[in-house]
Image (spheres, rainbow, N blue to C red):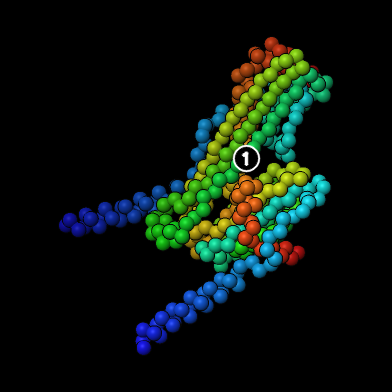
């Protein structure tokens, strides 16, 4: 009897854990390719493949430097967001207990893919942003769901 | 007595491992570039540059609309390579000792082409790899910072290569005049 109760308790804890984690995942429509990029702009897909490790960590992705910062999206596990930007240098960054940042050289009409992941941290998972090639990005983003833009 | 020696050795190992962790975030540059600030504005011509930041354009180059017969084309490409942490890292006690968990690389390819209507053609190509290892205590510099360092380094390497070929450009009349 005791053994049954212990198993039941473990199952309950795992189920609760899964429910909590599923609340952290993206829930929007499944990925659809953006038809056309507006003239004079570039398209950057920011996405994060759904993974168990770090799945509970949600981090905000920002564009620009500290002086002219724009919050783009809260990047959840399994989510993506298409971001349009003018040609030029674009810095994307995110932060939890450490900061990650990368800079892209954008030209008009570009379609670029920036992948977010979560790495091991001291107290909390650390965000990582990196650019991937179009082939990899187009393959991995198919599993992702659209995220809402960050509110101003 | 032996056990005391054993304990000392153990604690020394712990301290050394921890100190190693303090210094494991690094940037290594392969190959090391030569910085040359003194070789500014050597070559004059029409500059074709797709980059958006003039800080990364070699200092040896100067745009001169009067020299349409000299075309100078500078391009660079930046590639990022970031290693993902694994689930094993969550349970790896060595990370607490400062062991590196993963490595990021920024690869920069630079290319400068100098052509003239008379048939002169010279190309410089350079590759720079910048790496950083990360520990659980420090992520080190961001990819943005590393990219900037790499592009400045690329600029200086190209400048250095141009300065070595100064006599070649003098023979083909590509050097800037004093008035330019």
Camera-side residue of B38 and B110: B110
Chain to which the residue tagged by mark 1 belongs: B
Q: Quadrant of residue B164?
A: top right
Q: Residue at x 52, y 36 (%)?
A: B29
Please indicate, yes or no, whether residue A34 appears anywhere in the rendered image: yes
Residue displayed at 28% across by 55% down = B10
Tell whether B65 sits left or right of B124. Answer: right
How many labels sit on residues?
Answer: 1
Measuring from the top left, give residue A135's x and y in whole percent. 63, 47
Residue situated furthest bottom in the rendering: A1
Can you identify the residue that label 1 sits on? B78
The answer to whether residue A150 shows anywhere in this view is no
Depth check, front residue: A51 or A90: A51
Which part of the image, by quadrant, shows the C terminus of chain B? top right
For label 1, count other residues whose C-alpha is less than 10 Å away and answer few (under 14), some (14-19) or many (20+).
some
Percent x, y of residue B120: 70, 16
């Amino acid at each position: 009897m005791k053994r049954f109760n212990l198993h039941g308790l473990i199952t309950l804890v795992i189920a609760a854990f899964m429910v909590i984690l599923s609340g952290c995942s993206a829930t929007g429509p499944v990925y659809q390719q953006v038809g056309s990029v507006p003239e004079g702009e570039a398209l950057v897909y920011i996405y994060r493949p759904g993974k168990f490790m770090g799945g509970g960590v949600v981090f905000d992705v920002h564009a620009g430097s500290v002086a002219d910062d724009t919050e783009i999206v809260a990047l959840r596990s399994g989510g993506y967001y298409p971001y349009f930007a003018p040609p030029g240098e674009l810095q994307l960054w995110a932060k939890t207990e450490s900061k990650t940042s990368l800079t892209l050289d954008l030209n008009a009409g570009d379609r670029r893919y920036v992948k977010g992941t979560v790495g091991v941290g001291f107290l909390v998972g650390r965000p990582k942003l990196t650019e991937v090639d179009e082939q990899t990005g187009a393959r991995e983003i198919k599993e992702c769901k659209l995220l809402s833009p960050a509110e101003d | 007595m032996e056990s005391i020696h054993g304990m000392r050795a153990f604690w020394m190992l712990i301290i050394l491992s921890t100190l190693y962790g303090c210094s494991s975030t690094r940037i290594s540059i392969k190959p090391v570039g030569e910085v040359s600030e003194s070789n500014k504005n050597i070559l004059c011509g029409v500059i074709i540059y797709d980059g958006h930041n003039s800080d990364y354009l070699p200092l040896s180059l100067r745009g001169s609309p009067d020299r349409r017969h000299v075309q100078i084309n500078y391009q660079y490409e930046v590639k990022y390579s970031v290693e993902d942490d694994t689930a094993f890292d969550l349970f790896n006690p060595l990370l607490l000792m400062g062991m590196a968990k993963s490595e990021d690389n920024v690869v920069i390819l630079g290319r400068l082409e100098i052509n003239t209507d008379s048939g002169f053609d010279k190309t410089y190509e350079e590759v720079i790899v910048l790496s950083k290892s990360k520990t659980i205590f420090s992520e080190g510099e961001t990819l943005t910072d590393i990219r900037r360092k790499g592009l400045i380094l690329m600029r200086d390497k190209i400048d250095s290569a141009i300065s070595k070929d100064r006599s070649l450009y003098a023979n083909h009349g590509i050097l800037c005049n004093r008035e330019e």
